[in-house]
Image (tube, helix red, strand yellow):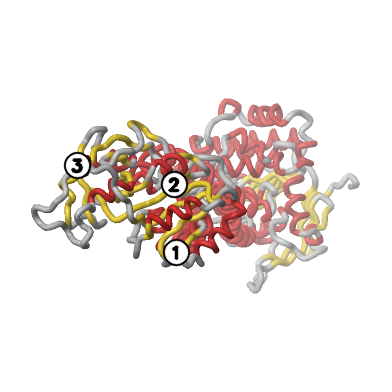
Amino acid sequence: MIEATECIRASNLSFGYADGPTILDIPDLTVQSGERVFLYGPSGSGKTTLLGLIAGVLEPPPGTLSVLGHDVGALSSAERDHFRASHIGYVFQMFNLIPYLNVRDNIALPVRINEERKKRLGSSLDIAVKDAAAHLGIEQLLDEKVTRLSVGQQQRVAAARAILGSPELIIADEPTSSLDANRRHAFLELLFSNVAEAGSTLLFVSHDLGLADQFDRSLSLPELNHAGE
Amino acid sequence: MLLLHLARQSLSNRLLTTSLTALSIAFSVALLVGVENVRTGMRESFSNTVSGTDLIVGSRGGTIQLMLYSVFGLGSPVANISHETWEEWDDHPAVSWTIPYALGDSHQGFRVIGTNESFYEHYKYRGGQSISLAEGRPAEEVFDVVLGSQVAERLGYGLGDPISVTHGISDVGFMNHDEMPFEVIGILDETFTPVDRAIYVTLEGITAIHLGWEEGGPPMPGEEIHADHVHEMDEIHVSQITSFFLGAESRAYTLQLQREISTSEQEPLTAVIPGLALSEMWQGIGYAEDGLMVISGFVVLVGLLGMLVSIYTSLDARRREMAILRALGAGPRRIVSLLVLEAGLLSALGAFLGVIFVYAGLAALQPWLEGEFGLLVPIRVLDQAQLMYIGAVIILGFVAGLVPALKAYRTALHDGLSVRV
């Protein structure tokens, strides 16, 4: 792969579920590598669908969406799963963790699922997990059951998991909406510094426009999306 | 390895459901394997009721009836055979030994068998084990009585106790030979065969209690013959026996002897080969055990169905978990594998517990089964059939796991990353 400067490029991306109406119609969307992008998306604007497409959980039409130089629509379902595991870190709004694994196993999970991501660790899995936890200030919680953690702690575990093995793209789907204002700010700081260290691109989705000014660039999904017009 | 780790953690996280499900599978497997064990024990103790005997000979009649009254102490003989006929066959050059049986009397519901010393010497059961005495000596004198182990235990008799014999073999005999006091002089070791439930006297003893009964009914009052008279008699003439067990000089003579006895002009006789007759009889009653197996098979199916339901109902609560796994790059196939693996682990755990239950149960219940039913269920390593059942249960467990797994697969594809919980 040549030094890609474009992390995400959508051109004439159009998508709708099976027989349903077209939900997304995006003529043009570009995210550069290393950018921290804020994507504003109120509920119902199709942001979950867009993230699903970028992450390769949903199947876009071939030739309309390229992520890290790969034509997502041209990949098979198994290839998309593998691609997601290798290159993308994902943080949900809440309930990010597997309830029956402890903190350590939760953080290590994506690397265990994917060999490529393991190769990028640069150290043993155990040390990498400790490092990631230390960066997010949760190293003392490694052996805790995740059900004992506060929501804020859970989100930090999710962030540690997302950055482990430095994936090129980190997608955060409203990760701060369940946090109060103080914790929201602290969490963002941690996320930013870790993303910067890993050299990853950050695509941050939220309906809270107040966060937008902390990012390199902000986009509005309702403006990008021409579906229904 | 990762999937195994996940499956194990997931199962131990839902400890209560997991252990209840595993327990229900364990009980059904225990039932299946246990029934198979009891079945084997029954078949073995049945076909080993008598061994080492080449032929059993009685008056002409059904072979099964002959087996029933001679070996199992069930039903009654139609006719007797004469003492002379028995002696002639006993002297036959191809015959090594015979054990005479004179039947028709009982004591407190237990059958009284008139026989001779040959019984203690030649009667064999379960692969050639001989009769042995726990206490006392074999019956030799007219009023000597040897008890089967169960008779002694149930009636609480010991050496030296006097007993009276009832004519007829129903529970309550209609005539008591009270005037003939018999005395216990020996008690046999336990054999787990009908031998334990019989009382052994000499042929002379049986004849003696019928002295004065030659007319076919009890003696007139005043004409009873008492024990003192018997002791004064020089010799008691035994005129009839009911059947006899026969050992040939060589196994090779068995068929020839059988044919010779059955076609004998002198007195109409029937001769059966006990091993053959026993396996024929088992085939006749064996369908009952098949029914038992079918039932325990269904119990296993119900157990697995319970597991299927418990995994299936947990799926809705686990949709979030599936979405997280998907987001981390686990393909739908991994999610299917995870659930199938969980089901497989559960059924394997259940099967393992079930086997432990069987052995624990056998160890605990063996004495009771022996005492109560005279049934010896051996504790031994799992045989091939049992291993196959257990293997089938585990495989069925995996298959049952496919049902919820495929549902999860569809849900995972449909949900993608967006689950509203």
Residue at label 1?
Answer: B269
Q: Chain of mark 2?
A: B
Relative placement, left or right, of B165 versus A195 is left
Do callouts 2 and 3 mark residues in contact (Cβ within 8 Å)?
A: no
Residue at the image point whose x is 85% and y is 47% from the top: A5
Circle 1 or circle 2, nearest the eye: 1
Element assignment for label 3: strand
Kind of residue at badge 3: Pro
x, y (%) of residue A86?
76, 45
Q: Residue at x 42, y 40 (%)?
A: B120
Q: Which residue is mark 3?
A: B181
Q: Is residue B40 visible?
A: no
Q: Earlier in the sequence, mark 2 or mark 3?
A: 2
Hey, what amino acid is under mark 2?
Leu
| x and y percentages locating residue B303 in the rendered image | 47, 54
Residue B384: assigned label: none
Q: Is residue B311 above or below residue B14?
A: below
Q: Please name the residue that numbered disc 2 is placed on.
A: B20
- Give the residue type at disc 1: Leu
